[in-house]
Amino acid sequence: MLIRSIQLRNYRNYDNLALDFAPDINVFLGANAQGKTNIIEAVYYASLGRSHRTHQDQELIRWEQPAASVHLRFARFDVENELEFQFARGKRRRILFNGHPIRTKDLIGSLNTVLFSPEDLYLIKGAPTERRRFLDGEISQASPAYYHELVKYNRIVQQRNNLLKKIRDHEARPAMLDLWDTQLIASGVRIIRKRLEAVQKLNMLANLMQRRISGNQENLRVAYEIHGAADEKVTNDLDSWYNKELAGKRELDILRGTTSRGPHHDDLVLTVNGVNLRAYGSQGQQRTGVLSLKLAELEFLRSETGEYPVLLLDDVMSELDVTRRQQLIAFLQREHIQTIITATDAAYFPEQHRGTFYRVHAGHVMR
């Protein structure tokens, strides 16, 4: 996977930026608030159809401008493609793939990326929502069918929740839940099976990365936790287990108006040498754990799709010590992974073979 070029028009603080990327490491240097992260954000947006910084597309349009666009040229398995996103105030965005309009569900998997930013430390310290989003994003890029199933499942949960509220308000009968429960279980089990399969691979790859980064001192384990399950044996018959759980929680679900069981409540548990990383890991261990997860995600996507995704590193070099920075750069160069990095100081990078550098200042980029 290689991004050839990007063009930003009235995007964030760029009026018209046309930029070619090198096939290896691209480093964007500059002070804060100059526009470095906006470039990474645009590439990430092209990959998943959403920003990692805002849920509002209108915020992507440059101040006082009526419209904006992002245009990328990229190669996948040596086949050249183009993606374009058009934004206009008060209107829905348009996505064009090789000149033809597509929907978000058709976008996922076209351009694969892995993003590592300082906010990703919340993968360890934050709520389960962050870890589910990480896992779902990873699997969706490798399997668009999984993304479609996830959209379907979320729609079922929303409709079931609406029915629960109506039952609570005596506007519907409890027996009407039977149909939704059947659909919820079928879709939820498919999602969990896919997640378990992915986590098994991710666990092996993440531990390998953790051992490399820590000098064989630390073993990282990534496990999937089914909300409400006493042990892992429930995976032998998930359909039956969910039937019992939903039946047992029905009255409580009606009272609360929400669905209390399902993959939308599950979590990832990370341990280092048997110690829970979220509860007891040091800050250094947590940072290393996140880095190992991201590098494992690279390897996972390569194993699933046949080629490495593009790696996006947004202002994370300052979060790593010298040894980890050197090991990271060496790994990227050895595996020939196209990488886009933002940083405030060139001193973060080794003297030799550092890549292609760009200077960013007030929405202008100079190679």
Image (spheres, rainbow, N blue to C red):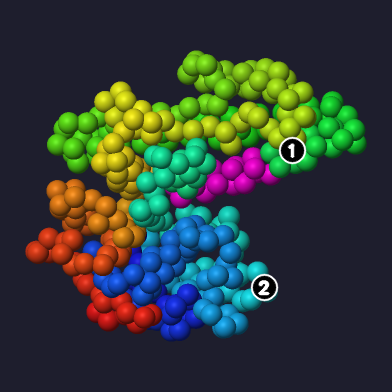
Q: Is residue 243 visible?
A: no
Placement of 312 over or under 240, stated as above or below: below
Q: Position of residue 178 (x, y in %)?
A: 78, 27
Image: magenta residue range = 139-155
Most frequent secondary structure within the magenta stretch: helix
User: Please, what is the three-letter code of the amino acid marked with disc 1?
Assistant: Asn
Left or right of 249? Residue 290 is: left
Could you tell me if residue 320 is visible in this image? yes
Q: In the figure, residue 313 lies in which quadrant? A: bottom left
Quarter occupied by the N terminus:
bottom left
Foreground pick, 74 / 123: 123
Q: How many marks?
A: 2
Q: Amino acid at mark 2?
A: Lys
Please give the residue where the numbered disc 2 appears in the rendered image.
91
Disc on res. 73: none
Q: In this figure, which residue is indicated by the disc labeled 1?
A: 161
> Residue, x 44% and y 33% (percent of image)?
268
Coordinates of residue 271 in the picture (x, y in percent): 34, 29
Instruction: Give the spatial CA distance, label 1 vs label 2.
Output: 29 Å
Residue at x 18%, y 61% (from the top left corner):
348
Q: Secondary structure at mark 2?
A: loop
Residue beneath the point at 9% across and 64% down: 351
Label 2: how many residues lie within 10 Å, few (<14), some (14-19) or many (20+)?
A: few
Which residue is most to the right?
171
In magenta stretch: residue 74: no
Residue 39, x across and y down, in percent = 39, 70
> 168 or 208, which is in the foreground?
168
Q: Earlier in the sequence, mark 1 or mark 2?
A: 2
| Picture coordinates of residue 240, whole percent (x, y) | 64, 18
Quarter that holds the C terminus: bottom left
Q: Nearer the viewer, residue 94 or 230?
A: 230
